[in-house]
Image (cartoon, rainbow, N blue to C red):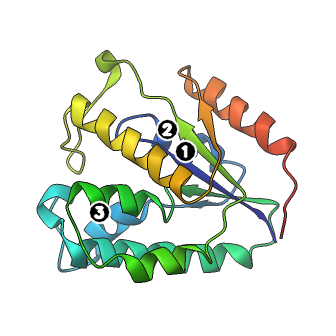
Amino acid sequence: MPLQVVITGGPGTGKTSVLKLLKKKFPVMKESARLVLARNTLFKGKDAKQAGGNVFQEAIWDLEVKHFAQSLVRKEKVVFFDRGFFDGFAYAQLGHLNGLHDRAIQGKHILYDAVFIMDPLPQKYYVNDPKRKESYTEANKIHALIAAMYRKYGYKLMRVPFGTVPQRTQFILKKIQNLKCPH
């Protein structure tokens, strides 16, 4: 089984840029929220705030579970995830969603080998896009909630310091060289 490695952080922290570089050599499971927004007819044409709610979050979690299961049978040594299952708990808390007990139980079966959290970029680099509507302040609040949720579920986060995309990518690759797959 390959190492299961999550790259996470608040909106606009540089996850996608780093993952684009990693994708040149490693498989990357795409961000489920963006895929749901792009593919699911219930949410097509909406941003995350417009689509918010239990149905949207459940669709994201379902896709996260599918991605995790698909990654387990890969032949590569490492599979990266653009966000992971536990990011959903931060967004659920922000949206004041209820009925998460079953997902918390399900999360006990999703075991990542490493979780990297990207340090937020300085505000001058923060950019909105058609799916990212959060202000810089909101993005930092989400970032803190994501970190708290991974810690709550027993993960030790590895902070990826601010730097260029190649520097951040190299930082991650050096750290995973020392990891052994516990499965």
Q: Which mark is residue 153?
A: none
Q: Which residue is mark 2?
A: 17
How far apart marks 3 and 1 lie (CA) works out to: 27 Å
The x, y position of residue 64, in whole percent, is 48, 72
Q: Are marks 1 and 2 in contact (CB under 8 Å)?
A: yes
Q: Which residue is mark 3?
A: 92
Residue at image location 16% in from the left, 66% down from the top = 51
Instruction: Give the structural element (helix, strand or loop) at label 1.
Output: helix
Q: Which residue is mark 1?
A: 20
Number of residues whose C-alpha sits closer than 10 Å to that of mark 1, classed few (under 14), some (14–19) or many (20 or more): some
Q: Residue furthest left?
A: 50
Q: Are marks 3 and 1 in contact (CB under 8 Å)?
A: no
Mark closest to the chain's N terminus, 3 or 1: 1
* Quadrant (top left/top right/bottom left/bottom right) for the N terminus: bottom right
| Amino acid type, callout 3 | Ala
Residue 44 to residue 146: above or below: below
The x, y position of residue 70, in whole percent, is 63, 78
Number of residues whose C-alpha sits closer than 10 Å to that of mark 2, classed few (under 14), some (14–19) or many (20 or more): some
| Amino acid type, callout 2 | Ser
* Residue nearer the viewer, 61 or 34: 61
How far apart marks 1 and 2 lie (CA) works out to: 5 Å
Residue at image location 51% in from the left, 79% down from the top = 105
Left or right position of 132 against 113: left
How far apart marks 3 and 2 lie (CA) works out to: 25 Å
Residue at image location 23% in from the left, 51% down from the top = 131
* Residue nearer the viewer, 102 or 51: 102
Left or right position of 113 against 46: right
Number of residues whose C-alpha sits closer than 10 Å to that of mark 3, classed few (under 14), some (14–19) or many (20 or more): some
Mark closest to the chain's N terminus, 3 or 2: 2
Q: Are marks 3 and 2 in contact (CB under 8 Å)?
A: no
| Amino acid type, callout 1 | Lys
Instruction: Give the structural element (helix, strand or loop) at label 2.
Output: helix
